[in-house]
Image (cartoon, rainbow, N blue to C red):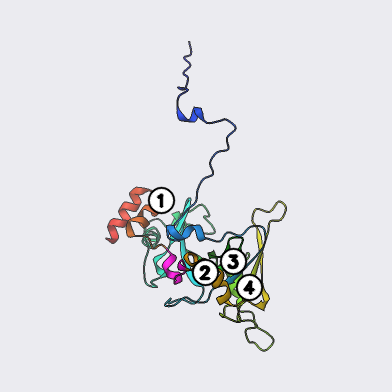
Amino acid sequence: MKTIEFVDPTETHNLISPWSKPKPATFDDRVLKPEYQVRHLRFAEGSTWFRILPTIKPSMFAWCMPLQVLNYPGGRFLHPRSLNRGAKSAFDHAYQWLRENNPGALYSKANITGIRLLTDRKCLCWVLLEEEEGVTARLLLESDYDSSRGGVAGLGQLIWRATRDVDETGTIATNAIDSNAGVLVMVEKKMGKGAKFPSYSVRLGRQPAPIAPMLEKMDPKEREVLTPIENVVHVPSADEEWEFLAKVMAQEHVDKIRASVT
């Protein structure tokens, strides 16, 4: 006779309402330091106006910091060459190792299910928004893909292009970043019916939006958050990088690669 076993009704999962919605999976975004992650600007559908901040001294970057970002299932992190041009990542060592030992395992157009160890271009900058609670500081972190390989340019690239738009003489039409003469930037996000991904458009305002009056409207504690842009990113340790790599390929291969470079 078939034996039927029942789950103990005191187990946790049995106490959850069957009508409860499952908790959404969280994306492990390690690009920003934990204390700055809540400042990541996420665009809602419709129009969002903001003011880009000029470079905060003594930053070594212009107002927009170019980033190289590596991805793993469920998360992403900063490639160290974003701050140090010659730096290498555990993913670089793995890419070289696979090219020499198992090139067929790497991602390519012919092998879209392969292991992807290449970076994505992002841009990062400080922006100010007028919100109900006053002027707040946010971090704009968006794709800097330039559409050179096909497809649509990333939002970060569209914003960059808007600030570099030239007039008929070849001169930049509006210095959108200038502390006094700069203007607001508008991003419009649309989600077409049946579309999997939103579309974005960017345009510049026409009236000067000086930074000083906006800073005066900010709570003093809010102003204290502003810092050179490179201070907000999280540079992972070597151990973290190898841990992330183990989410992309077998641990035994990770151990072998790490042993070959240390």
Q: Which residues are magenta?
A: 224-233
Three-letter residue code for mark 3:
Leu
State the residue position of label 1.
249
In the image, residue 249 above or below residue 227? above
Front label number (2 vs 3): 3
Front label number (2 vs 1): 2
Tell me if 148 is positioned left or right of 76 in this view. right
Res. 222 mark = none
Front-most of residues 215 and 248: 215
Sequence-first tag of 4 and 1 = 4
Which class describes the residues within 10 Å of circle 3: few (<14), some (14-19), or many (20+)?
Answer: some
Q: Which of the 4 image quarters holds residue 173?
A: bottom right
Residue 15 drawn at (x, y percent): 50, 28
Front label number (1 vs 3): 3
Residue farthest top in this picture? 1
Is 217 within the magenta? Answer: no
In the image, residue 154 above or below residue 175? above
How many angstroms separate mark 4 from mark 1 (CA)?
44 Å
Residue 106 drawn at (x, y percent): 45, 57
State the residue position of label 2.
126
Q: Judge whether residue 216 can be spotted in this image.
A: yes
Three-letter residue code for mark 1:
Met
Front-most of residues 119 and 238: 238
State the residue position of label 3.
129
Tell me the quadrant of the picture where the C terminus can be found: bottom left
